[in-house]
Amino acid sequence: MTVRRVMPLVQSEAMSESREFYGLLGFEEVMNHGWIMTLAPPSNPAAQISIITSDATAPVTPDLSVEVDDVDAAYAVVRSSGAEIVHPLQAEEWGVRRFMVRDPNGRVVNVLSHR
């Protein structure tokens, strides 16, 4: 399993204000589903930050996302470790397979692969 990117998620109700603020630092909107918006600088599109109101299909809102090349392998490893899975592995309508796990600090990590 290879990590492709790590992206912080900032929970906020101030979506447009956040877009404007991070725009000052060179970020532009690259995705917006209404409840989650991803920003990235054109010069380095893998350097991303997402602003999220709350997760639309999970019972918790994650603190960060980790994209991996094989989410099924990641799920098997994490599950066998005994870590708390807070959202089961599933395919989402926007083109990812993901699950969520709570880290030892209580943070929720969204682990995903694009389909």
Image (spheres, rainbow, N blue to C red):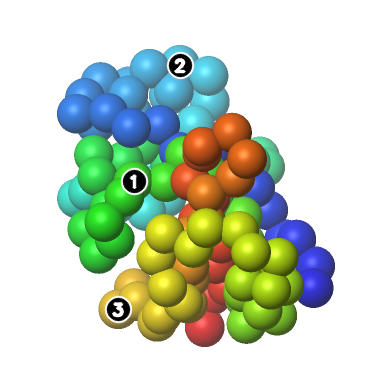
Tell me how far mark 1 sits from mark 2, CA to CA: 26 Å
Which residue is the site of mark 2?
Answer: 24
Q: Which residue is mark 1?
A: 61
Disc 1 residue type (three-letter) = Thr
Apparent side of residue 2 relative to residue 10 in the rendered image (left or right): right
Q: Which numbered tag is attached to residue 93?
A: 3
* Marks 1 & 3, CB-CB < 8 Å contact: no
Where is residue 110 shown, x and y percent of the image?
50, 56
Mark 3 or mark 2, earlier in chain: 2
Q: With 34 as the anchor, is 21 left or right in this view?
A: right
Badge 2 marks a residue whose secondary structure is loop
Q: Residue at x 19, y 50 (%)?
A: 34
- How many numbered circles does the render carry? 3
Query: Does residue 99 sit above or below 44 in this rendering?
Result: below
Give x and y (percent) for residue 43.
66, 39
Asked whether 79 or 67 is in front, the reply is: 79
- The mark that comes first in sequence, 1 or 3, is 1
Mark 1 lies on a secondary structure that is loop
Q: Earlier in the sequence, mark 1 or mark 2?
A: 2
Q: CA distance from mark 3 to mark 2?
A: 32 Å
The residue depicted at 23 percent of the width and 39 percent of the height is 53
Residue 24 picture quarter: top left
Q: Give me the residue at 43% from left, 24% from top.
A: 23
Q: Nearer the viewer, residue 92 or 16?
A: 92
Q: Amino acid at mark 3?
A: Glu
Q: Residues within 10 Å of mark 3 (few under 14, many from 20)?
A: few
Q: Amino acid at mark 2?
A: Leu
